Amino acid sequence: MSVFALVDPVLQGLLLGGLYALFAIGLSLSFGIMRMVNIAHGDIIILGAYATLVVVNQLGIHPLAAMVVVVPVLAGFGYLLQRILLNPVLGEDILPPLLVTFGLSVIIQNVLMAVFSADSKGVHADAIQTASISLGGGLAVGWLSLVIFVVAVAVVAGLELLFARTGLGRAFRATSDDQAVAQLMGINNRHLYAVATALAFGVTAIAGVFLAVRTTFIPTLGPSKLLVAFEVVIIGGMGSLWGTLAGAMLLGVAQVIGFRYDSGSGVLAGHLVFLVVLLLRPQGLIARTRDL
Amino acid sequence: MSGLRFKVGSATKLSRGAWIAAAVLLVVLVLAPWWAEDSDMRSIAEFAYLVAIAQMWNLLAGYGGLISVGQHAFIGIGGYVLLILSLNAGISPFLCVPIAGAFAAVMAVPFAAVVFRLHGPYFAIGTWAVADVVRLVLDDIPAIGGGSGKSLTSALMAIPGWQREATTYWIALGLGFGLTLGVYVLLRSRLGLALTAIRDSGPASESLGVKVKRVKLLVYVASAGGLGLAGALIYLTKLRISPDSAFSVDWTVLMIFIVVIGGIGTIEGPIVGTAIFFLLRGLLADYGPWYLVVLGSVAVLVMFKARSGVWGWLATRFDAQLFPTRRRITIEDQPPTAATNSAIATSK
């Protein structure tokens, strides 16, 4: 076996991890701050992809520039969704928020189906979809993959800074530790939760735009993206965004190696890594040091 | 305390009537092959197996507190046991149904080893991931049709048409009535008391000697077994199986929406929910994907306005329970006075 056959899938997998980290961060944020899991999370990614399609078709701008519109729109949607639909059902019982987001997932999928049909869609960008940098020895890295990876690292670093250094970050951490006490200290948790969801949806929208530029998509793709995001969070270890990035890279490498071995086994290989981590190291790669 | 008579029981006039009505209904439906059209029988069979799978999700989530969105794993497993045993091993398709149930229950044990490491909402998604693993593994086995699946007709061809239709129908009916009764009996047993205690407070019941983990595992396995039975039966009626359809999350969507709309944590809820589902699907048949949008919206609305579902709302409104699992005290002869109250207190 040549060095190339070994190094190339690992390299491509690590870069794929950038996209997977962007898939997972939103999920990790809402669980970390609110103990809430949005089952429609994957569908929000796909909603972001369709929003990109609409913006590109309407405004005729570059798909990556569409982010300027798609991210704030989805963040605003997240804020309203949290305030109107999710805050009222958050509480001791975990069923209501799970069920509401489960219902939302079915609703988003079927509305997308009714509006855009079940045919696969895609957006055309310029050379960035195919351009690559040669690293010598037959190795090459796609520009797009590289951009996505850099953005993912920047998002993780930015969020860590936000949590560590800003007043908003402190409020998030306080609410995560003890919601009731945080409220006694004057934190308006209804607004704070909505801001958290806006943040989560904003990051998820970035993932949606990148997904749209990378591949074609259909309305029912959401659940598979939810599973990727979930596995990344569990592999990486709950409560650490750098862990999420590491988990995403491990899952990416597993999938690419599985895919090279047999084109049907990529996703399965990812699942197996998830199961092994859950059985042998349930706390994840980077154990929780704090909740966020 | 002389003259005071009271009894502890769960039956009411209404519930005794409900049992009689259910028995009459069962007899009428069992005789359906002699009076009903084929299409009616298919509808009744579908109704019965939807009630059955909804009861299984209700047992797990409503009574066991284990909210899973991956229960379609066991429907798929049941369907594939039917496929493999009837086509490849030549076992009678009808005999495959109980075997499928047993196999699904056995498979639930290793599944539990994985998913019970997760809690709350992450448990929910974990079950889904495990279901997807099974789907992808079956996708890769060409001997059982791989990703495109297989037809079951050749396994059923040897059986005469009438006998095939009637037996399939009776199994569906048996599952609908049987699993409902099974959940009822389970809840009236010691296990049911343990479940109620755990639902009210896990740590408190643990300290009173309830083995919380074992009880939850038992409920998970029981629910898997019931879904395995139903999975085999469902694909007896559909006659064609593929990994994507058998392991589709749509099965779980149906279970959850039916239970939540009907009333979670009640025996009657899944039956009422299935009736509402049939009604909505019939009304919105011409609108394609919109019927699922409406169904999802109704379920969300229920979580907002009447968390105990349609049946739960009716039951509190009219104090009606058709199949009561809770015991209540009935005082005979005397209106409750200070004396009767102290009598109740000392009788504990």
Image (spheres, coloured by chain):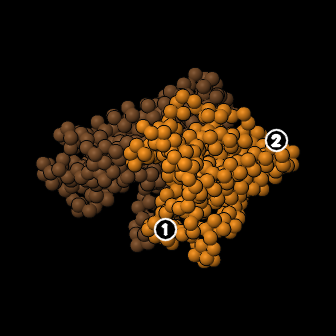
Residue B208 relative to residue B273: left or right: right
Marks 2 & 1 on one chain: yes
**First in sequence: mark 2 vs mark 1:** 1
Position in image of residue A27 (x %, y %):
63, 49
Say which colour chain A has: orange
Q: Which residue is mark 1?
A: A121
Q: SS class of the residue under badge 1?
A: loop
Q: Chain of mark 1?
A: A
The structure residue drawn at horizontal position 54% and vertical position 33%, both measured from the top left corner, is A277
Q: Amino acid at mark 2?
A: Val
Of all residues, the one furthest to the right in this rendering is: A185
Position in image of residue B106 (x %, y %):
38, 32
Q: SS class of the residue under badge 2?
A: helix
The structure residue drawn at horizontal position 41% and vertical position 61%, both measured from the top left corner, is B278
Q: Is residue B138 above or below residue A101?
A: above
Letter of the chain shown brown in the rendering:
B
Query: In front here: B283 or B143?
Result: B143
Q: Residues within 10 Å of mark 2 (few under 14, many from 20)?
A: few
Position in image of residue A181 (x %, y %):
82, 41
The structure residue drawn at horizontal position 39% and vertical position 34%, both measured from the top left corner, is B107
Between disc 2 and disc 1, the foreground one is 1
Position in image of residue A269 (x %, y %):
46, 41
Q: Chain of mark 2?
A: A
Q: Amino acid at mark 1?
A: Lys
Q: Which residue is mark 2?
A: A181
